[in-house]
Image: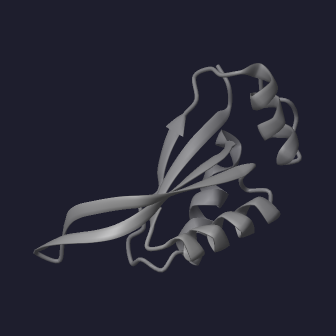
Amino acid sequence: MSDAIVVLVTVPDGKKAASIARTLVEERLAACGNIIPGLRSIYRWEGKICDDPEVLLILKSRAERFEALRARIVELHPYQVPEVLRLDVADGHVPYLKWIAESMGGAESA
């Protein structure tokens, strides 16, 4: 079992996603952020069905940093209720898991 995590965050556009990702990587709360454009989100908000374009920000981090990462995402995010979903990584390519830990200034996690 690894202590690596993947965090999913929907964001209104690529510029905001890049800004959030850059800040989190600079602050060593995330090792990496991938921005996937072209999402279409259909959801219920304040009693209405909404249909909006978004981008998906996928962050790689460590379990021990999740609470700080979550709090910082909420601070930086423009939405009233941002999506912040943590997915624990059960296993992975050991050199990549080590890279995540080293990029964040921590001990090897694999």
Q: Which of 63 and 41 is in front in this view?
A: 41
Does residue 63 lie above or below 34 as drawn?
above
Residue under the image location 11 percent in, 75 percent down = 48
Any part of residue 27 in sight: no
Horizontal and vertical percent position of residue 39: 37, 59
Residue under the image location 73 percent in, 56 percent down = 29
**Total numbered labels placed on residues in the image:** 0
Residue under the image location 21 percent in, 69 percent down = 51
Does residue 18 lie above or below 108 as drawn?
below
Q: Which of 102 and 42 is in front in this view?
A: 42
Residue that extends furthest to the front in the rendered view of this protein = 38
Q: Which quarter of the picture shows residue 55?
A: bottom left
How are the residues colored? Answer: one colour
**For residue 34, side relative to residue 25 (left or right):** left
Horizontal and vertical percent position of residue 2: 68, 25
**For residue 87, side relative to residue 28 (left or right):** left
Any part of residue 37 in sight: yes
Horizontal and vertical percent position of residue 9: 48, 58
Horizontal and vertical percent position of residue 6: 57, 42
Q: Nearer the viewer, residue 54 or 81?
A: 54
Residue under the image location 58 percent in, 67 percent down = 73
Q: Which quarter of the picture shows residue 110?
A: top right
Does residue 20 lie above or below 93 as drawn?
below
**In the picture, which quadrant includes the N terminus?**
top right
Q: Which quarter of the picture shows residue 68?
A: bottom right
